[in-house]
Image (cartoon, grey):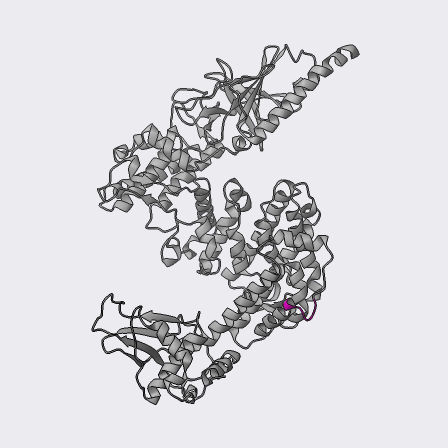
Amino acid sequence: MSNFEALRWQMSASPIGYHPSSWSSIGGSLDAQPELLVFLQFLKPSGSRSMIETFSRSSRVAAINAVFVSFCFPRGIHVKRTSPLPRAPSPRPIRYDVYGGSTLSKTCTAPSSRPSSPNWHFIEVDRLEKKIIIGEERCSMDAVRSIPHRLALRNIDSIVKEIEKIRRHHETTINERHYHHASERPRKIDKSSRLDQLSKRLQEYAWSAEPLAKERAIDEALRLSVEDEDLRLVFQSRFFYYSTIQATFGRQHNFFRHDNDKVHDLWSTVLSTCASANSESRYLELNYLKLADSLKHDHHSFIAARYLRHVLDSRLSGNELYFLVKLWHHYLDFALKIARTIAIGQRLKLFQYYIIEWPIFNECLQVLPLGVLKIAFAPARQIGYLALRLINIGSRSLVPNFFSIFYGKPTLALEGLNSGFQPSSEKLSTYRFSFRHLPLYHGALLNSVSDSDPKKVSFGRGKFFEGTVLEASSLWPQYFGVLGVVSKYYGSGILLIGSSLFYLASCKKDNAVRANASAITALNTFFSRSIEELQSNIPDGQALAAFLVESFAAIDLYCQNAVETFNGLAGYVDISPIRLKTIRERIEVPSIPLFDNVPYLRRFTMNGHVYLASDFLPEPPVMVMGGFDVNNDLIVDTMSLGGELVIWLRIYGSLSPFSSGGHYPIHATDDHYVAAVKSQHIYYFTSVEEDASSVTYKDELGEEHSTSDFFVLAQRHEDTKFEWREFWPKRDPSYSAASESARRDDEHLESLLKSLVEFRPQMLECR
């Protein structure tokens, strides 16, 4: 073994690192160091013919030092050419710097004689003089200190990759591994096996005095144990005494204690059932209380949360999805409680009773479903209060994904702005984002601020809010202010007083005047600020303002009317039908949830009487009572519609009768319109005539009621057309179900009607 090989072997086996002065014992000429020759040949430019001349001892040591770093740490160093590689001979020498890469501020043991700032080692190739110059320069201490840490981290990564390869993690999912563990008897790991040897090496790094290596080794052991139940059993005996986890306030809990086995088994079975693809499973329902308790337990919460992160990523459905949402709400409440405790300074009490891993909570947020399910998993009220607590704490780094997911500023792709801004649909392409969720979360945060002491909340200013829609200097807060108004009337309806086109109110008519004034104030603020941006010379600001105004106009004909009638605002934007239709196709506008879930209406005409329903059967279910010929006395029509295409008109008949002027109500018959009365969460459908001050409806028991407080269903846009299509006894060839759930409902209704046809002769015989 050469001196250089011996030194390389010695250094790779040592966790501490040597000072360059200790390498000076390597003597001899450069010709005696074949590795150096190979290295220099590798460095020389293509096509050059270098000649190595005789060097002094100090230069030779410098060269060996440089070669050692590059040879022993091929992935941990960088070789940088500091002058360009010429295509022809150049009088300037080509210089290569050999250094330690990115720094990690960690200490390491070294001889006390080590200088405070070691040297850079560089190699210059002078092609004209045909020689190589090896020299030194002063460098940062961090470059040398980082070498043993980088080597340890690289070794840990290598160990983990080999473990995953042995366990075939690249071929199976986490759920499948837990399923196989539950369905097969776990095999004991041979002490002499490669897997056991690797776990022992990972254990040694977990016991290391180097904090960075220790943290990485423990974190990987925890991750592998959650993702593979068999590996947890392998690691349990090795990590029992010292594999601890650092919690929020420094409290340590052992992940591999045997009294935690029940928690591991409980959550492992959850992941196992996720792999079985059985949507009818009742495991989450039957074990809900145990699972919920583990998420808040003093010793088990951080264990349960690591499993919960993978369950959230399993995309459950049906009954299991319902209980998963409940579990997540449970954990969200827990996080909110701890954040509140931190915000008010009760750290000693938190240290004694609670524990949560914010990084794991952050990962859970990242895998939450998008689209319609997002609001189910993340209720606006809870998100608003949690945002307030994090603002009070003053640290976005605690849960970095939170504000980017719920309050992140949408990015807009601007096109053609070099030629100057023009209100053209080709000038701006939009990024797809949800108009349903952003205003809800924004409004929830404002409500949470108003519920607390607003003077104690520094809101919208500072680096904390950069990149979010909460930034005070941005147009987004004003935009969400008017969207908040719109979202209210999509829940409570547009209140009509006479022929007013844009009269907004809450559910209580006593607040109508105040709500309308608030809506007008929000509109004036947003529109005035938008005009300022549109008149500026900043293309980005102009484009954003134009897009937000156009997006607001695209929501419904009432928003469009507001843009058209505000101080010449329409002259700065494009609100043509084609442009608004394009925007509606790209964004999610506020919607009526009732018709998101059931995207159709039914009309049952029996013996001259008309019954309306938004589900399977009308109230009361008169068809099953008999007394008529299903084939001859019954006609069923269906109207397909969506929650994003209709709107409720709120009618208080005691204030003003219903008037269809300026609106597009949906016809129930030729002279009646579709109406509904809402009682708690149930809609009872009926019909209403022009100028009516009240409606009559029947409940599920068949009892008749009258009220002057009702809704009328109307089109959201002028160009939308809704038609009744025959479903029974003949089906209109042009009819098709609006969704998969509607198709199943069609099949059930058709099956019921056919069974009534078959059952009618027996009913007549009984009479």
User: What secondary structure is the stretch in magenta mostly built from?
Assistant: loop
Identify whether 555 is placed above or below 538. above
Is 191 within the magenta?
A: yes
Residue 718 coordinates in the image, percent (x, y):
39, 24
Residue 645 position, x and y percent, is 45, 29
Residue ID at (57%, 64%):
162
Identify the residue shown where x is 41% and y is 41%: 432
Identify the image quadrant of residue 396: bottom left
Q: Nearer the viewer, residue 379 or 712?
A: 379
What segment is highlighted magenta in the picture?
A: 190-194
Q: Give the answer, above or below, for where 532 lies relative to 54.
A: above
Residue 46 spot, x, y in % from top left: 31, 68
* Residue sitting at x 53%, y 60%: 358
Q: Nearer the viewer, residue 482 or 433?
A: 433
User: Is 449 placed left or right of 364 in the picture?
Assistant: left
Residue 171 seen:
yes
Residue 143 position within the rendered picture, expressed as x and y whole percent measured from the top left: 40, 75
Total labels: the figure holds 0
The residue depicted at 48 percent of the width and 60 percent of the height is 398
Based on the picture, tell me whether residue 322 belongs to the magenta stretch.
no
Q: Look at the image and tell me whether residue 292 can be seen.
A: no
Quarter of the rendering occupied by the C terminus: top right
Task: Compare residues 747 and 627 and report the one nearer the observer.
Answer: 747
Name of the residue lying farthest toward the left: 91
Relative to residue 471, is residue 687 depicted above or below?
A: above
Tell whether 395 sits left or right of 703. Answer: left
